[in-house]
Image (spheres, grey):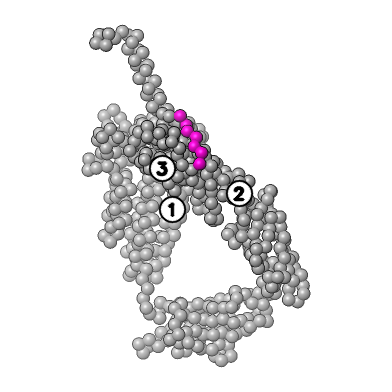
Amino acid sequence: MASGAQSPRQKMINLMYLVFIAMLALNMSKEVLSAFGMMNEKLETSNRALQESNDLFLEGLAQKAGENPAKFQSLLEKGQQVKELSESYYAYLDELKTQMKAEVKDASDYQVMDRSDFIDQLFFGGSGLKKEGQDFLDRRIDYRDQMLAVLPENMQSIKEAVSLRFTTGDENGQVTNREGQKVDWLNYNYEGFPLIASLTNVTQIQADVMASAQDALKALLEGQLTSEISYTNYTTLLEQEKSAFYAGETFSGNIVLGRKDSSTKPNAVRLTMDGRPLSEGKDFTIEQGRVHLTVGAGNPGEHTISGELVFLQSGEETKVPVSAQFSTIAKPDAAVISADKMNVVYRGLENPMTISIPGVAENNVNATAPGLRKVKGSTYVLVPGTGRDVTIVASGKLPDGKVIETKQVFRIKEIPSPSGTVRGETGSLKMSAENLSISTVGAVLEDFDFDLKISVKSFKVKIPGQPTLEVSGTKMDSKTQSAIKRAKRGDLIQVFDIDANITNNNTYKLKKVAPVLIELTN
């Protein structure tokens, strides 16, 4: 019957079988969809930080251009072009993302964002690309070409990075797929993908835009920051034994040049304190490399020392302006309590604290709080217990015998969610099946102020078309390694449900560890 004509019933059975196979192929696991969603959130957070950083770099260029237009004005104009190009392209991508999420009731429910019809219908038609698809491709090419045109020739490494980030395939706009066939770049990267995957892809393009802008702006700023050896480029610094003084004390400090040099001695000194002229010998002395001040600290409040130091340079006088401030404070009646790392404390950690009272010896200061212990001197460690805040009470005896007491409340926060790692990398990465099989799975706290070590007990591995595997320890077991060998190039393998805890602290329950998504390269 193989060579004969098929019955209508057999044709229907064959068609249903093909449809079933297609549905299986399109059925991406909910875990993978969620992983894309979490990755998109991380990328958007990173993009906002990059935007702020780029604004600061441009402000730096603007400041330099105001100080030295001859050197920096042209660079500022290039920086403004980079910013305008990047913001315009970024805004277009933002609008596209808004369209992609328009029909999604809950933009945070990534498990329902598995359909591919939006991008497929927006970009692709029966005869090729639609207008929207061609526009998407053209904007990518235009941004790359305009950035390359703006960047100076001496920034070749940055130009190469921009070209690599915004590639569109070979000279014909094609790439080679896993079957070794040439396909259009846009089809290869966007056709048939789940909505959340395409959304994350667009966010990654925004990340590339911000990174390219940052590379360019940083290079423009740093490329002209030269130091010229001249007295006109010097500033003055105020050296002082302590930052504040009691009323009635004598202020002791030094005004020095930014570059300390024993051979640098001013030929003349003209200074005032709060407008009152200072006298040499009484209020200050001229020494090698500095002007030593011995002026009275005055009443509590801010005090300004201003004037100029005069040097002879090439037979001519060079004046270096002096502008410095110091504070005089009244004798304290309260303790000073501060967190060494941040203004909050974290549950489950030894939070370093400094507790002191200005003018009071460390052995005369006493501090108490649940979980607080003294290490040495003014150094303490606080391990918060239950509750949302903790109160530290500090007391001490002043030199005149008066006892003061101060209370301060600190908020208690939980340790943030760790990120899973494979081979020490987080998020979405690419590697070969061989490398994945021998890689170590771990967890880290990204951008966390504490150097906290985390131990992994177990994890799960999801390979497309295969059952989810649970692994004990930090290495792939033999069963998982065999499953990885059966995976295909381009398969997205997820490492998730990572069971981790703080090393040497099994009592604290960490938040859920973010998964890792690996694309096989062979």
The residue that label 2 is drawn on is 505
The residue that label 3 is drawn on is 438
Pick the front one: 508 or 180: 508
In this picture, residue 309 sits left or right of residue 251: left
Compute the Cα span from label 1 to label 2: 35 Å
- Which residue is depicted at the point 50% across and 41% down? 473
Work out whether 300 lies above or below 389: below
| Residue 484 seen in this snapshot | yes
In this picture, residue 2 sits left or right of residue 444: left
Compute the Cα span from label 3 to label 2: 28 Å
SS at mark 3 in the image: helix
On the image, the x and y values in percent for residue 307 come to 50, 83
Magenta span of residues: 467-473
Work out whether 267 lies above or below 231: below
What's the amino acid at mark 1? Answer: Leu
Q: Is residue 451 magenta?
A: no
